[in-house]
Amino acid sequence: MSQERRYSFEFFPAKTEAGHEKLLATARQLAAYNPDFFSCTYGAGGSTRDRTLHTVLQLNGDVGVATAPHLSCVGDSKDDLRDLLNQYREAGIQRIVALRGDLPSGMGMASGELRYANELVEFIRAETGEHFHIEIAAYPEMHPQARSFEDDLSNFVRKAKAGADSAITQYFFNADSYFYFVDRVQKLGVDMPVVPGIMPITNYSKLARFSDACGAEIPRWIRKQLEAYGDDIASIQAYGEQVISEMCERLLQGGAPGLHFYTLNQAEPSLAIWNNLKLPR
Ligand code: FAD
């Protein structure tokens, strides 16, 4: 694999046996492209604790690609987090994605002892030293709950300096927001790789809903074209593939240190972009 750039694929733990089998089939297909790692999301508050653990161990062991569990701190006690870290370490896991997480509405904030991701990064370092490569989340278009862009930048810098090694961004459709973010954090003394998170476009209504919630902006020129396709899924996918491939090309040409694909447990949309970019296998 490329020494300079890293490529990774993200999954979410499936709820059903059939979904899990599909995830494994997707992972095997993607493993053939020799990515640097897989990652698997975690339901804040521990809602996917066992499923994430099980999926990570299977991807890492049976599928044979180094896999990074996501770990979020809101709603989990320090004992729960310590227990998971120990299990991952014993299983030979070496990379972790450290997050605050978003509790499902109604769960409240009371049960967690750590409030922000910078505290989780500190906790992981205190508990496990330098064992894990720690990834953190970055928001080129600002985290939706931040008071201001500048405030969010300061919070990112604090989290990075708490002991993180690299960052993965929230997805975005505007390459300039990424370049601006990287430039700003570098000027604030953070020199770690910030890898763009890439969301293939496969379905407009779901994407619009999700983007509203996570604060990713779909630019008007993309939105209008996707709306115009209506229910024509094939055209949405073909257009999405072209737009995202072109954005990735710009990102890589502009120095992005790799790409992290939000696969939503599907291989084809990410692979189509991968092949368009002629990324290494
Ligand atoms: P933080 O860095 O803690 O930031 C959260 C908010 O608080 C921001 O507005 C920030 O400006 C502010 N802030 C940060 N630190 C402080 C501080 N010390 N004092 C005051 N304010 C502060 N969610 C999941 O539930 N499970 C997952 O598996 C998951 N995976 C993700 C993977 C990636 C790559 C990304 C980008 C996001 C992921 N998320 C996941 C979503 C993420 O958990 C949410 O966006 C969450 O709201 C913020 O998490 P964070 O780690 O970025 O939080």
Image (cartoon, rainbow, N blue to C red):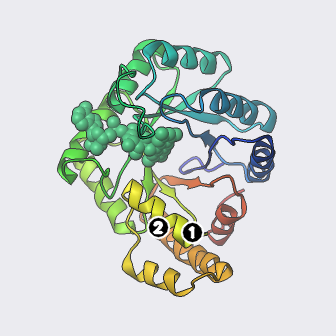
- The relative height of residue 204 versus residue 89 in the rendered view (above or below) is below
* Residue 56 on image: x %, y %: 67, 33
Q: Earlier in the sequence, mark 2 or mark 1?
A: 1
**For this view, does 13 lie left or right of residue 184?**
right
Question: Can you tell which quarter of the image residue 117 is in?
Answer: top left
Looking at the rendering, the quadrant in which ligand 1 lies is: top left
Where disc 1 sits, the SS reads loop
Question: Can you tell which quarter of the image residue 160 is in?
Answer: top left
Which of the two marks, 2 or 1, is nearer to us in this view? 2
Name which residue lies at 69% across and 42% down: 14
Quadrant of the frame with the C terminus:
bottom right
Mark 2 surroundings: few (<14), some (14-19) or many (≥20) residues within 10 A = some
* Residue 2 on image: x %, y %: 61, 50
- The relative height of residue 254 versus residue 14 in the rendered view (above or below) is below
Question: Can you tell which quarter of the image residue 48 is in?
Answer: top right
Q: Which residue is mark 1?
A: 201
Q: Which residue is mark 2?
A: 208
The kind of residue on which mark 1 rests is Ile
Give 189 or 84, whichever is nearer the viewer: 84
- Is ligand 1 within 8 Å of the beta carbon of the residue shown at mark 2? no
Residues marked 2 and 1 touching at CB (< 8 Å)? no
